[in-house]
Amino acid sequence: MKNNKSNQQTVDFPVISEKIVPHTADSLNNCALTYLDKGMSAEAEECWEEALKTDPDSAILRYNYDLHLWKTARIDDMEAVRRLTSVSTKDVNYYRCLAQLHIARRDAESAIERINEAIAIYGKTDALKQTLTKAKNMKKKGLDGRCVFTLEENIDLIDSIKSTFGALLDDEQLFSKMRDNKVYAVCFSPSGRMALSAGTGSKVMLWNTATGDCIQAFEYTEHSEEKGCLWDAKWSNVAVWSVCFSPGSGQWISGGENLLVKLWSNRDGQCVKTLKGHTGAVRSVCYSPDGRLCISGGEDHLIKLWQINSGKCIKTLKGHTGMISSVCFSPDGNHCISGSEDHLIKLWHIESGKCTETLKGHTDAVCSVDFSPDGKQCISGSRDHTLKLWDIVANECIRTMEAHTDSVASVCFSPNGNLVISGSWDKTLKLWNIETGACNRTMVGHQGKVESVGFSPDGERVISGSHDGTAKIWNLPVIDASGDEFEWSKI
């Protein structure tokens, strides 16, 4: 905050030797900002809490206090929006503060909509015009986060169902009519120019990420030949639970409901190898960094290590007592981690096949795990609605991140390791700051549970897959490291 000098005697930064006790909501708000500039967060919060008792419907008070709570990782961006929109006084300050909050979220489109609403009611005030210009510039420069492509196989079918049943069904019921369109897995290619999506319907789709067009559809119809498995007609619609590109991106692997790991060629769309050995559905697959090995985790509680060239299983890792939901190689290829329905995360040594660490802390099934780029940390997502950041070396939880309202189905580190993206059954994606634990942005757009998320190799985009039958590619919001996106309001 800057001092404003005038002929009148004003003090922007009082000497705080004794506790300041102003009596109006306005002065309490301005005093809170002064405390905040002095690094006295607790005193600032006391001022805002007292001010809100006096004037609970002040948009400026609500905005400043919740912006502070969001910045310090006590609430997420959507909770800040919810609290601000709950005030009953919808004056010009309300619209301006709500637009500023959306700008801080890097949601330029929502900010522009709110300002245009205000202009229609109150006219073009200088403050509204200034905020509108800021939002438009953000959008023009591509600094905001938004969905740029929606990837869906049967768009005509979706439109037909919407037109026929849309008035009778809510979103969840609408998309439940398209079981064969649920997307369970998504993945960018190493170049970022292609992406895979897979799910129910016995198909894996290869997409051009620059245009959003489908390049090829891979048929996944081979039945399991494992002894003792009896298949009937329902298994012709095989679910594909996981996909992963090879480091060279010429091939990719998949794991599915039919107990198999399959190796595919991008050139001709043919399955070049089928890896057999699991006795339960394969829920997760991952290539080693050098592309010579892959690991798979299944509903049979087992992790299997495979040689790509020979197609042979060279190790089976045992230790979990529940379904293996997620597996991931370490960046150096010497270890892997696994997350399971038994609530545990295990670290395994690849050469020996031994479990070297077990990470405990989640209170429900672990749905997803991922290594940080430096291999020193890992992130996990769970049905207990939380993410946990772990120190692999110290074998301890560094931070628990809470904001999702349902299972955290998928987590992924950004290539630089500063951010994590999470996808949840609450239908949202959340972008997290690893250093602070703050949720920088919630991305809304899917109409069903989000099952899978991933970063592009350049870290500028995110892909997501959902039970609504679509995959989406999102531009990642550019967050100002200096914190200048947080604009406080004085009264």
Image (cartoon, grey):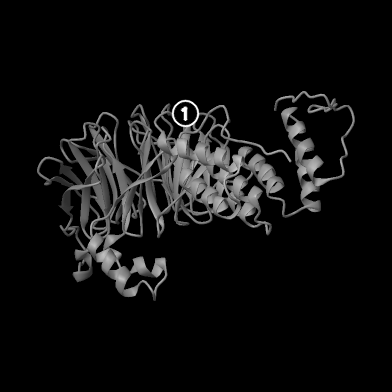
Q: Quadrant of the C terminus?
A: top right
- In the picture, measured across the screen, residue 99 lies left or right of residue 456, that is right
290 sits to left or right of 33: left
State the SS at label 1: loop
Residue 355, quarter of the rendered image: top left
Q: Position of residue 471 (x, y in %)?
A: 32, 51
User: Which of 186/80 is in front?
Assistant: 80
Tag 1: amino acid: Lys
**Image quarter hosting the N terminus:** top right
Q: Residue at x 63, y 52 (%)?
A: 84
> Image check: 225 left or right of 89?
left
Does the rendering let one see residue 347? no
Q: Residue furthest right?
A: 18
Q: Image point 82% across, 24% down: which residue?
A: 7
Measured from the top left, where is residue 64 in percent x and y?
68, 42
Image point 54% across, 44% down: which residue? 102
Estimate the x, y position of residue 80 in percent, counting from the top left.
61, 48
Whether residue 147 is visible, yes or no, is: yes
Up-down: is 124 above or below 234?
Answer: above
- Seen from the viewer's position, the closer of residues 421 and 47 is 47
Query: Furthest residue to the bottom?
Result: 168
Crowding at dot 1, Cα within 10 Å, few <14 / some 14-19 / many 20+, comes out as some
Picture residue at 52% right of the left edge, 41% below the top: 132
Q: Quadrant of residue 90?
A: bottom right
Number of marks: 1
Q: Nearer the viewer, residue 367 or 201?
A: 201
Q: Which residue is mark 1?
A: 376
Residue 453 is situated, as x and y percent measured from the top left of the image, at 38, 45
**Vertically, is 394 above or below 471?**
above
Q: Residue furthest front?
A: 123
